[in-house]
Image (spheres, rainbow, N blue to C red):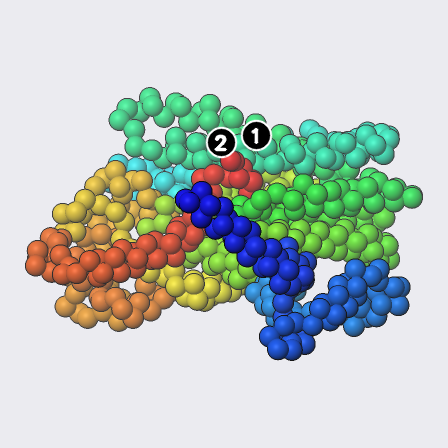
């Protein structure tokens, strides 16, 4: 009985399964397979979808599209750019940045160019006067009596060394024949001259990088405190090395000027075209590399130096050509198209190079205003009373521009091109010198005013009023002897005068605070008004160095601690690029970063 009941149940189950298969709708399998989806658009009658509509839709989808249907779809299909708004906004900002690059770059180039002009004119105008004052001090020292540990101030010693290097190198350049060098270079083939010019550019960068270190080593060896007098003998090898460097670098620049002169005087101008195309090769080596803000700053400084050097080389070429044509003004108009073409190619290459570098590295055009503020900070800080370096040396370290070799060559070319005979000629030379002095003074005044404006805009003037780092308890003590000798005082100011001089408080400080400023040299406050948030200069000295009381230090909640850490990190993030820009010369070789 049990077996019969089990077989009956199994037969009933099989019958139910067969009945369900008969009642099953054919489009259910299509829905499960994913070929056709059940949508509300299909006609529904009595709870069932119309199978004919499903089959009609399946036939339309499986049919091959016709050419007219494809063309109609291509002509009528649309898309919406606002679905990717961030992407297209970024692309538009890149275009705007590229359009702003020429203006911002040329502002930086013009400012840097006049900085180089100021450092270059210093060699011809103020340096001879400073050397003359140092010599007069040495001559009048026995009459006035000797008081103090130094015969000359450190700045005067450096001026004397610069003057001696110029005189010796100029006398050595008289033994180099410019005309023979010109004809020797002119006899070479075009390809050889092209290779020579490229090699000279590389050698110029290497000489500039190592030359400033040689000069700095000489200045420090001559001015550092010495325990024994025989330690001063070490200045002699450094001085010979510096003279040898300046002489070789001047010859190298002379070969560059001769090669450029040959290119100008060639009949088919093929060499000039090749040399100009060499500037565009520079784009290939720079554009497709990764650059940060610091690297771009170094490249900008290098471009400023190269542009100024090329202008001086063009001046030398024009002087030599005008001499050969007996100073005929008509020949100057013959040279003008070539000069204009060289200058235009330099400007175009710089604009294209910087535009694509900023595009590929997502750098905004506002970064050039930061670079300009950093250069302005160097100028303003070098004018302070406690400056530790000369302005021309700071420009040399920042841009790789060393004015001494270029000045030696220019003096040599001018002396050979212009014949000075008679009292009238010497009068004209003296008037020309007075004009150069006036130009130097005017340029320095304008640059100093512009630099103050740029430093204020960049909110960097607080760095100018920071006191030199000393021990925590030395706010009421006088600087040590080593510190005084490390940062030389301006020329003409003796140590006795400096110790006996009464300090004058800034115009905005109160009279009661003037007594505490006597302990440490302060920067010149007449260039800037004191910062609005800062107190009088005596406030940091009178403030106790101890930390604030303990109950104020801990914060009650964890969220405030995290907020304080976030604020500190954001301030450090904003301060770091400026600090890197101000200290960028430590990692440069002629404006090229060492990675």
Task: Give the answer, above or below, for where 457 lies relative to 406.
Answer: below
Q: Position of residue 338 (x, y in %)?
A: 82, 52
Question: Is residue 278 visible to us here?
Answer: yes
Residue at 27% over, 49% down: 468
Residue occupying the far right of the picture: 267
Q: Position of residue 3 (x, y in %)?
A: 45, 42
- Left or right of 411? Residue 437 is left
Q: Which mark is residue 311?
A: none
Query: Of callouts 1 and 2, which one flags the residue occurring earlier in the amino acid sequence?
Result: 2
Question: Is residue 142 visible to us here?
Answer: no
Q: How many neighbours does mark 1 have within 10 angstroms: few (below 14), some (14-19), or many (20 or more)?
A: many
- Disc 1 secondary structure class: helix
Quadrant housing residue 207: top right
Image quarter of the N terminus = top left
Find disc 2 in the rendering and name its residue. 214
Residue at 33% over, 21% down: 230
- Left or right of 484? Residue 319 is right
Residue at 52% over, 36% down: 594
């Amino acid at each position: 009985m049990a077996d019969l009941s089990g077989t009956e149940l199994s037969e009933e189950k099989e019958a139910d399964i067969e009945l369900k298969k008969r009642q099953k709708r054919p489009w259910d399998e299509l829905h499960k397979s994913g070929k056709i989806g059940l949508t509300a658009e299909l006609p529904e009658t009595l709870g069932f979808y119309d199978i004919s509509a499903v089959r009609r839709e399946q036939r339309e989808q499986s049919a091959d599209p016709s050419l007219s249907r494809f063309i109609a779809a291509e002509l009528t299909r649309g898309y919406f750019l606002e679905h990717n708004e961030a992407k297209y906004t970024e692309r538009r900002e890149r275009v705007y940045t590229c359009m702003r690059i020429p203006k911002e770059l040329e502002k930086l180039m013009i400012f840097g160019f006049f900085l180089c002009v100021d450092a270059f004119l210093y060699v011809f105008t103020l340096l001879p006067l400073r050397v003359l004052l140092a010599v007069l001090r040495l001559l009048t020292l026995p009459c006035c009596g000797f008081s103090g540990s130094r015969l000359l101030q450190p700045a005067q010693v450096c001026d004397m060394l610069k003057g001696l290097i110029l005189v010796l190198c100029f006398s050595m350049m008289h033994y180099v024949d410019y005309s023979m060098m010109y004809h020797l270079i002119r006899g070479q083939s075009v390809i050889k001259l092209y290779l020579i010019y490229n090699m000279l550019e590389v050698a110029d960068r290497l000489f500039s990088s190592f030359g400033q270190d040689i000069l700095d080593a000489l200045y420090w060896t001559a001015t550092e405190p010495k325990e024994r007098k025989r330690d001063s003998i070490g200045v002699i090898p450094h001085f010979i090395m510096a003279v040898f460097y300046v002489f070789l670098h001047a010859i190298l620049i002379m070969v560059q000027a001769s090669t450029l002169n040959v290119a100008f005087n060639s009949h088919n101008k093929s060499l000039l075209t090749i040399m100009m195309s060499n500037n565009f090769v520079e784009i290939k080596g720079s554009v497709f590399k990764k650059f940060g803000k610091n690297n771009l700053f170094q490249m900008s400084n290098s471009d400023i130096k190269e542009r100024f050097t090329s202008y001086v080389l063009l001046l030398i070429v024009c002087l030599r050509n005008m001499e050969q044509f007996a100073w005929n003004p008509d020949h100057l108009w013959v040279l003008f198209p070539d000069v204009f073409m060289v200058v235009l190619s330099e400007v175009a290459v710089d604009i294209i190079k910087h535009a694509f570098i900023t595009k590929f590295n997502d750098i905004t055009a506002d970064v050039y205003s930061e670079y300009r503020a950093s250069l302005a900070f160097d100028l303003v800080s070098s004018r302070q009373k406690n400056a530790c370096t000369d302005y021309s040396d700071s420009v040399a370290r920042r841009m790789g521009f060393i004015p001494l070799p270029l000045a030696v060559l220019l003096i040599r070319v001018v002396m050979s091109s212009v014949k000075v005979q008679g009292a009238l000629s010497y009068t004209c030379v003296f008037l020309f010198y007075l004009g150069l002095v006036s130009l130097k003074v005017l340029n320095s005044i304008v640059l100093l005013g512009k630099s103050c404006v740029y430093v204020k805009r960049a909110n960097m003037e607080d760095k100018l009023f920071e006191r030199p780092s000393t021990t925590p308890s030395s706010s009421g003590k006088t600087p040590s002897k080593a510190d005084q000798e490390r940062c030389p005082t301006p020329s003409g100011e003796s140590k006795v005068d400096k110790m006996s001089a009464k300090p004058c408080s800034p115009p905005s400080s109160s009279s009661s605070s003037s007594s505490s400023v006597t302990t440490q040299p302060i920067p010149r406050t007449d260039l800037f008004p004191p910062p609005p948030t800062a107190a009088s200069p005596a406030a940091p000295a009178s403030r106790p160095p101890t930390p604030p009381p303990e109950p104020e230090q801990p914060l009650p909640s964890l969220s405030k601690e995290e907020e304080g850490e976030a604020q500190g990190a954001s301030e450090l993030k904003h301060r770091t690029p400026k600090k890197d820009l101000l200290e960028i010369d430590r990692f440069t070789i002629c404006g090229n970063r060492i990675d």
